[in-house]
Image (spheres, rainbow, N blue to C red):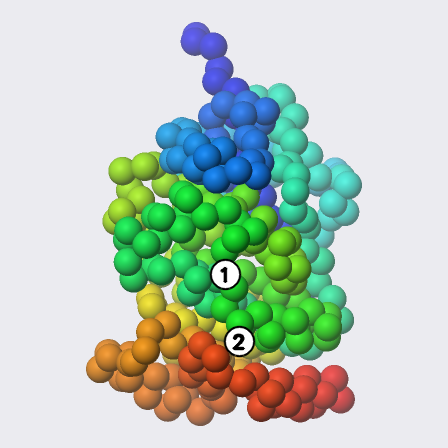
Amino acid sequence: MGKRSSVYIWQFTALQFSKKIWIEGSLIYGNQGERKVHTTWMGHFIEVLLSYFRKPAAREELKIRTGTEETTLQTDRKGGFSCLLNHFEMDELQISHHGEHLELPGGYPAYFPQNGAALEVVSDLDDTVLHSYTTSVLKRMYSILFVLPRKRKAVAYTYQLMEWFKRQDIRVTYLSKSESNLYELIYAFINTQELPQGALLLSPYLKLHQLPKPKKGKDYKYNHLHTLLTEQPTKKFILVGDDTQRDMEVYTAIIREHPDRIIKVFIRQSSMGRNKKQEQLWEELQDTGVAATYFADGDETRAAIDSLTSLFMRSTV
């Protein structure tokens, strides 16, 4: 029998629901000490580029122990793992691989408890919270590889919404199609901008050749949103996204499946104008009857914040 390869947890999130806890993460071959945080653009470039050369730990068995309960699961072909567990205390959580205890990554919270707020927010990241240029492969790759997280620009309108969510102690979950390779880049941006520290639900880990045309699953966002809503039946939701990918289409489908659960939708207009397809998707979203705002960079947030304040006050009565 050959020597077992060492593995480490690259990304990890534990999100508390009404009766369960959802854990999700990525497993990589190698040693935890390989990961580094750099403050220079050259160091950042090298570290991010290396993340696309590291090998995901596919089809590896993990044991997850929470007090007296033990769950065994297997990573998928891209090193990802997820499952729903019964409630547990975070300090009781133990994850092991062939008897070896695995440490959780640092730098960002791993556990996101449910709070008493009746509202929750689910937000996209790319071109919704931070400028990512997802419609241009070259611009996106340049911003990923050469721009330090502290230099990345936030979308001003969404930033102000996030400040309001943070002041009201409304839990924010970031549901993004950004690949797990960018976990550290994303949380560094969130920490630098002092945005709400929410669970990072990212798409599968990628290899370098997949970066220009990544395949991340057509129903990735829909399936995650469906779980977030069905596992929290007493919560109402605010959805935040943009018009560069499938946010409007996915949000419309979710609203139709879960009527009365979504109380507000925000969509960022990512370019100077809207094309025919974007106008059609916007009309379909409006036809659901849910209050929705299609905002452009530079728009004032005062009316939106007033509307959110009213919704929040009604939800607490």
Q: Is residue 168 above or below residue 216?
A: below
* Location of residue 184 in the rendering, given as x and y in whole percent from the top left corner: 54, 44
- The answer to the question of whether label 1 and label 2 lie on touching residues, with beta carbons closer than 8 A, is no
Question: Residue sitting at 74 percent across and 66 percent down?
Answer: 115
* Location of residue 88 in the rendering, given as x and y in whole percent from the top left corner: 73, 48
The quadrant in which the C terminus is found is bottom right
- Circle 2 packing at 10 Å, graded few (<14), some (14-19), many (20+), is some
> Looking at the image, which is closer to me, 249 or 234?
249
* Location of residue 104 in the rendering, given as x and y in whole percent from the top left corner: 64, 36
* Location of residue 117 in the rendering, given as x and y in whole percent from the top left corner: 72, 74
Question: Residue sitting at 36 percent across and 60 percent down?
Answer: 133
Q: Secondary structure at mark 2?
A: helix
Question: Residue sitting at 29 percent across and 80 percent down?
Answer: 273
Q: Which one is in front in this view, the residue at disc 1 or the one at disc 2?
A: 1
Q: Which mark is residue 280?
A: none
Residue type at mark 2: give it: Tyr
Question: Residue sitting at 65 percent across and 31 percent down?
Answer: 103
Residue 102: quadrant of the picture: top right
- Left or right of 79 in this view: 109: right
Whether residue 11 is visible here, answered yes or no, is yes
Residue 92: quadrant of the picture: top right
Whether residue 263 is visible here, answered yes or no, is no
- Circle 1 packing at 10 Å, graded few (<14), some (14-19), many (20+), is some
User: What is the C-alpha distance between the residues marked 1 and 2?
Assistant: 12 Å
Residue type at mark 1: give it: Lys
User: Which residue bears the numbered disc 2?
Assistant: 157
> Looking at the image, which is closer to me, 129 or 138?
138
Q: Secondary structure at mark 1?
A: loop
Q: Which mark is residue 153?
A: 1
Q: Looking at the image, how many numbered discs can be counted on the residues?
A: 2
Q: Residue furthest left?
A: 276
